[in-house]
Amino acid sequence: MQALRRSAVELVAETDAGPSIIEEHLARFLYHEGVGRVGESERRSWRASVPTLANDLRDAGLGGVQVLLETRLPLTSKRADVILAGVHPRTGRHSYVVLELKQWSGARRWEASDTLVDVIGAPYRPSLHPALQVDGYVEYLRDFVRVLADDDDSVRGAAYLHNATESGVADLRRAESGARSPVFTGQRRSDLHDWLRSRLAPDSGVRAADDLLSSRVAPSRQLLSVAAQEVQEREHFVLLDEQRVAYELVLAEVRRARKSDNKAVVVIAGGPGSGKSVIALSLLGELAREGRTVMHATGSRSFTQTLRQVAGKGSTRTKNLFTYFNNFMTAEKNGLDVLILDEAHRLRLTSVNRYTRKEIRETARPQVEELLDAARVPVFLLDQYQVVRPGEMGSVPEIEHHARARGLDVRHVDLNAQFRSGGSDAYLDWVLRLLELRGDGPVEWHDEERFAVEVVDSPEELERRLTTELDKGLNARITAGYCWPWSDPRPDGTLVDDVVIGDWRRPWNLRGDRSVGGAPPSALWATGEGGFGQVGCVYTAQGFEYSWNGVIFGPDLVWRDGRWVSRREYNKDPDFRSRKTVDDATFDRLARHVYKVLLTRGMVGTVLYSVDAETRDYLRSLVNA
């Protein structure tokens, strides 16, 4: 954990000398933490809040308390405004207080909600009830910071609205939000002082701060117990054949690694619908039940967000076990028993981005090595035909190379049974041969009892065909190659119809985290209500499935003179623009992988359309000819 650290006495002295001093220290600290340059709005909030906090600590007589500003919560990009570290006045043990500082002059309930609030001038409306916000930080710290895990009374939270009056927040106090953290206002500063003194003594908090910032980071036993119930017991997954083999093999390797004090690597490879994610969730639930320290990570924002929503349903704590590949750059070596790496074909060359701290960037290692080091048993689940972006390195040979270079044993399981596409091995083989990714070239397709393929002459016909399936109660989505521009919603919330084919116009799925105009946020496009109204791309479709799958071939991949021709000039994906980064051969391979992913999302059937007449005729010649 990282924070800008001061004693209360030091903070008072710096703010008395001028608020710009601590402001500059905070800006410099966050810059070196990889956040980048801080905007004026955040500087204004520090200017308003930090001197106020310093005065309150002085007036409460808590000069020895350690103040941790902008503390980054482990394994996330979230930051707590303030954590106070000190000694409990009654028990003498370490005591911590998480403070959320708000500049709000007042707030009221959002419509009839007890959990959302409306704040005039806030960047987001509605906002989360501030007490619930700090509740989440407290719970997360208990779940992942080992020094806090065994003492439920060691950390508490509070929201401090230092510009607000009691009348300005009366509506919040009436709301039955279920929050445990209190809310204090500037009008009743004395209440805050009394509460702080009930949690913190005037003594030095240096040892408490040292122990917190250097604590081991791993899921707590309490969190694993919750996850076992939520994931494993809430929904029973049936594993068949190779799926059960992979599951049992991982459990055996975990037990062997603990018994022999050793490491092992498991690689589970399979096509779409072969059950990789079912295995992953089954392992997460079972290992949590056994009390193993286990986490689940992916390289896909959409996939992780959906897993948090589905597998963590009913428990915000369980959601925190689902994270991302790039959150393990500074993880403790073998700090976890098991790290489940789902969709491992999304592995990147490194975890570094433009916000990464300089000292970490200079010593950056390949991402696969970071993940190999993070657990005694890292488990990679992948489909190497789903590498669709430049810089993605997830393949069986790549993982095995890095593992064996470290002297690690690798156990490899192939999942041959298919459960998406109606369980049709024939369809998956047809797609790979159609795109010339395997075999001796395209072959004809004839519908099976469990899976159907159709070719249509227009996007209007494609949409009508899928609508008939929606009317039957099935779900369906339309996807396309990234061959049209992608606009943000208009100021009035309406979406821009970027995908234009003749008279047919539809918007892309949203790019952001918020629902707009009835369209679900980006991460939930494939699963949320309202997703059929937009066209999805490979980044929102990958990892998901729906009953009926409509696929639009754009002009970036066409059939000419007996072969596929990829045309970069028609592709709008910014990752493919640079010929220096992505040469023509790589673009051709990745373009085929993109359409392979899009073509294999359906469980009942797929409807195909190409904007290119020659390609459309060729597809029709192959499908149910």
Image: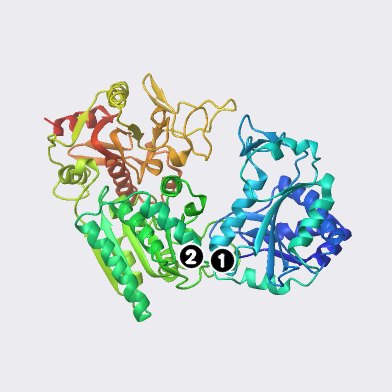
Mark 2 residue crowding within 10 angstroms, few (<14) / some (14–19) / many (20+): many
Mark 1 residue crowding within 10 angstroms, few (<14) / some (14–19) / many (20+): many
Residue 149's tag is 1
Secondary structure under tag 2 reads helix
Q: Is residue 406 visible?
A: no
Question: On the picture, is 67 further left or further right than 128?
Answer: right
Secondary structure under tag 1 reads helix
Residue 122 x, y percent position in the rendering:
69, 38
Residue 446 x, y percent position in the rendering:
12, 35
Do the residues bearing badges 2 and 1 touch, measured as CB atoms within 8 Å? yes
Question: On the picture, is 272 further left or further right than 482?
Answer: left
Closest to the observer: 35 or 115?
115
Q: Is residue 119 above or below residue 89?
A: above
Residue 293 x, y percent position in the rendering:
44, 66
Please name the amino acid that badge 2 sits on: Arg
Q: Is residue 354 above or below residue 91?
A: above
Q: Residue furthest top?
A: 503
The quarter of the picture where the C terminus appears is top left
Q: Residue tagged by mark 2?
A: 221
The quarter of the picture where the N terminus appears is bottom right
Q: Quadrant of residue 595?
A: top left
Residue placed at 76% from the left, 52% from the top? Answer: 46
Q: Is residue 320 above or below residue 408?
A: above
Question: On the picture, is 533 further left or further right than 175?
Answer: left
Question: On the picture, is 181 further left or further right than 578?
Answer: right
